[in-house]
Image: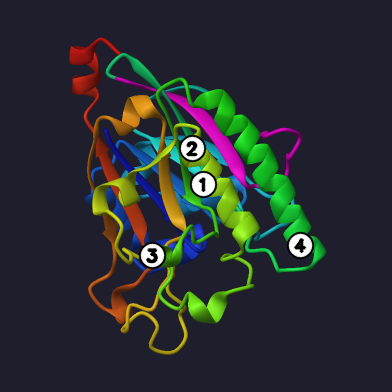
Amino acid sequence: MRVITANVNGIRAARRRGGLEWLAQQEPDVVAMQEVRASAKQFATALDGSALAEYELAHAESAAAGREGVAILTKHALASSSCVIDGFDEIGRWVEADVVVGGRTVTIASVYVHTGEAGTDKQTAKYAFLDALEARMAQLVGRPALVMGDFNVAHTVNDLKNWKGNRGKAGFLEDEQAYLTRLTQNGWVDVVRANHGDVPGPYSWWSWRGKAFDKDSGWRIDYQFASPTLAAVAREPWIGRAAAYDQRWSDHAAVVVDYDLAALETTGE
């Protein structure tokens, strides 16, 4: 099961820049998208004519037009879906679906955590959403499940090139990082970090401005968190970083992981 998570920075813009074509070329079983910034009609129009148009869709749009929005696309049967996480509805930051792959049900969640701003109401709202996210993930950890997307938090100094210059700023606050630490302590596995080890990067976001991309001065804020069942069969995670600045179709790069579900069958999971 090939799974991709990508903050598309607007589904319509990603289509114009070749993002949907790139995603389809990876032949994913599941794609989780964040910041799609589209109504249901706009989303369908953006997908029309692409290989992803044949995928089943679960989409949570924001009540604010042109803002946020998350989605799950799957080439397999979509058993159920929900857009609500502990009362946070109409914000377009959480969509969850049960996907049936080869007779096995896997719970998939696509999440977008907004940026925040230290010392403001915006940051307080970010923590409230992270509280709800943490509570829901505690309920999912015992099943085959993936929670992935743009968390807008660099977990450690290895997840941010300019970590010294970002101390005290949203995205690199100790209180934010504590949420991700607790997730890993409670069984969730950051599959990219588990595969790459305790080293800087690989980053998944770079500013459009300046030479951040060319210098690889980025942040790793896009994650695939796997429950223990699926983490055990995660294979070769990688970041879909564009070969050059002018080939970028989002300010984020996709995170791609293969999960060997056949291995679950042989272990009796």
Badge 2 is on which residue? 185
Disc with the residue nearer the chain's start (4 vs 2)? 4
SS at circle 4: helix
Badge 3 is on which residue? 158
Contact between labelled residues 1 and 3, with CB atoms less than 8 Å apart:
no
Going by the numbered disc 1, the residue's amino acid type is Thr
Going by the numbered disc 3, the residue's amino acid type is Asn
Badge 4 is on which residue? 122
Up the image or down, 195 lies above or below 122; here it is above
Up the image or down, 70 lies above or below 77; here it is below
At 34% across and 53% down in the image, what residue appears? 255
Up the image or down, 262 lies above or below 161; here it is above
Highlighted magenta segment, given as a residue range: 81-101
Quarter that holds the N terminus:
top left
Contact between labelled residues 2 and 1, with CB atoms less than 8 Å apart:
yes
SS at circle 3: helix
Badge 1 is on which residue? 181
Color style of the picture: rainbow
- Total count of labels: 4
- Would residue 150 be found to the left or right of residue 131 on screen? left
| Disc 2 packing (10 Å; few <14; some 14–19; many ≥20) | few
- Would residue 123 be found to the left or right of residue 24 on screen? right
At 53% across and 82% down in the image, what residue appears? 165
| Disc 1 packing (10 Å; few <14; some 14–19; many ≥20) | few
Question: Magenta stretch containing residue 203, yes or no?
Answer: no
Q: Nearer the viewer, residue 66 or 85?
A: 85
Disc with the residue nearer the chain's start (3 vs 1)? 3
| Disc 4 packing (10 Å; few <14; some 14–19; many ≥20) | some
Disc with the residue nearer the chain's start (3 vs 4)? 4
* Residue 50 visible at all: no
Contact between labelled residues 2 and 3, with CB atoms less than 8 Å apart:
no
